[in-house]
């Protein structure tokens, strides 16, 4: 039966053209290398090298065998790397990028899912906005992320949509919720909007700007805030209305604005959430785990998008 040790000695002798140099390269005694090759030849019933002076010359059988031996050893190395990768992330740190309000969909639940499988890991969920998370992906600070893809460039990136979430109009005035809100009505609304630091690249605002393009106006923000919770509280106080993802509205209104409600836009508008990583990336077991768990969490609260 062939052994890894025999194949290692065979390749070293083949590449070095000398049993002595092969032994030096492997850190073995020269007689040990010679014995491994003789055993391999006996096992196969062929001659692999001809002894010429102080060196060795491969036979045609050795030429034919070399690529197969290389593939076997490469596969073994990949197996060892995979096992070590799993072993290391069981007690290491898992970092995953998320768009800002993803905490409402998957934050604590996602961390709980990870710790249920691997109690010894340390978990980091990174990101306040999809744009900055994408930059971390490009620079290699993150392996993978779940992002709102309206403002994500696909250049050099693998972008896999997994779910979409309807954007809804939220108000404490029941009269504003009797029918879906058109672009014309939206252009006249007094709004409070979150993500003020990222207002130029916020996916929700970009969607609303496209919706209002035909009216020649931009959404009129009366109040700018950073977090979506504050925006919803202000809606509950009757100071402005807002447009946020439906899942966020369903989670936050009962707690922060119980007298407010929501209605669809006309035509309906959506945020799309996608798994994003560098196109050339070979994802680690940790990254693949986070993608699997984050996708399940997002699809549980938003409308799934399945690849055909």
Image (cartoon, grey):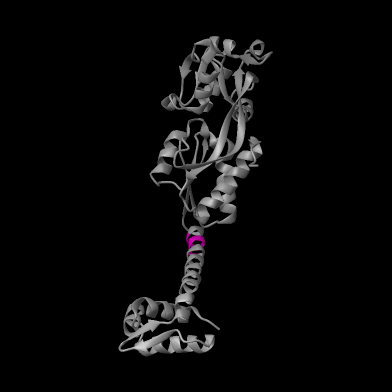
Residue 287 inside the magenta-drawn segment? no
- Can residue 259 be seen here? The reply is no
Q: In which quarter of the image is the N terminus?
A: bottom right
Q: In which quarter of the image is the C terminus?
A: top right
Judge by depth and name the residue closer to the eye, 166 or 242: 166
Looking at the image, residue 244 lies above or below residue 57: above
Judge by depth and name the residue closer to the eye, 14 or 252: 14
In the rendering, at what x and y percent does residue 119 appear? Answer: 55, 56
Judge by depth and name the residue closer to the eye, 295 or 280: 280
Looking at the image, residue 34 lies above or below residue 293: below
Q: Quadrant of residue 303?
A: top right
- Can residue 238 be seen here? The reply is yes
Looking at the image, residue 241 lies above or below residue 202: above
Q: In this view, does 301 lie to the left or right of 66?
A: right
In the rendering, at what x and y percent does residue 154 appear? Answer: 48, 37
Magenta stretch, main secondary structure class:
helix
Q: In which quarter of the image is residue 50?
A: bottom left
Q: Is residue 185 left or right of residue 6?
A: right
- The residue sitting at 66% across, 13% down in the picture is 174
In the rendering, at what x and y percent does residue 225 appear? Answer: 46, 23
- The residue sitting at 43% across, 82% down in the picture is 59
In the rendering, at what x and y percent does residue 95 appear? Answer: 47, 48
- The residue sitting at 49% across, 12% down in the picture is 217
Q: Which residues are drawn in magenta? A: 84-88
- The residue sitting at 49% across, 59% down in the picture is 91
Judge by depth and name the residue closer to the eye, 66 or 192: 66
Please, which residue is most extreme toward the front here? 60
- Counting every numbered tag in the picture gives 0
């Amino acid at each position: 039966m062939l052994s890894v040790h025999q194949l290692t000695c065979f390749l070293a002798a083949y590449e070095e053209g000398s049993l002595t140099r092969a032994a030096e390269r492997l850190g073995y005694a020269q007689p040990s290398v010679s014995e491994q090759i003789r055993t391999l030849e006996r096992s196969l019933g062929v001659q692999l090298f001809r002894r010429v002076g102080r060196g060795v010359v491969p036979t045609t059988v050795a030429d034919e065998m070399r690529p197969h031996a290389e593939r076997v050893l490469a596969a073994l190395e990949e197996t060892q790397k995979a096992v070590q990768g799993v072993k290391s992330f069981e007690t290491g740190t898992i970092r995953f990028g998320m768009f800002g309000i993803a905490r409402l969909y998957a934050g604590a639940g996602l961390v709980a899912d990870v710790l249920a499988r691997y109690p010894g890991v340390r978990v980091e969920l990174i990101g306040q906005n999809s744009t900055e998370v994408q930059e971390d992906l490009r620079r290699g600070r993150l392996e993978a992320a779940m992002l709102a893809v309206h403002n994500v460039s696909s250049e050099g990136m693998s972008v896999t949509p997994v779910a979409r979430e309807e954007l809804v109009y939220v108000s404490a005035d029941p009269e504003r919720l009797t029918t879906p809100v058109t672009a014309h009505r939206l252009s006249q609304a007094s709004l409070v909007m979150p993500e003020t630091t990222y207002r130029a690249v916020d996916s929700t605002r970009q969607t609303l700007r496209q919706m209002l393009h035909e009216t020649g106006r931009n959404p009129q923000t009366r109040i700018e805030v950073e977090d979506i919770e504050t925006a919803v509280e202000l809606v509950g106080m009757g100071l402005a209305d807002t447009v946020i993802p439906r899942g966020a509205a369903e989670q936050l209104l009962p707690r922060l604005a119980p007298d407010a409600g929501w209605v669809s836009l006309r035509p309906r508008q959506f945020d799309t959430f996608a798994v994003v990583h560098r196109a050339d990336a070979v994802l680690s077991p940790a990254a693949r785990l986070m993608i699997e768990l984050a996708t399940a969490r997002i699809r549980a609260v938003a409308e799934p998008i399945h690849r055909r």
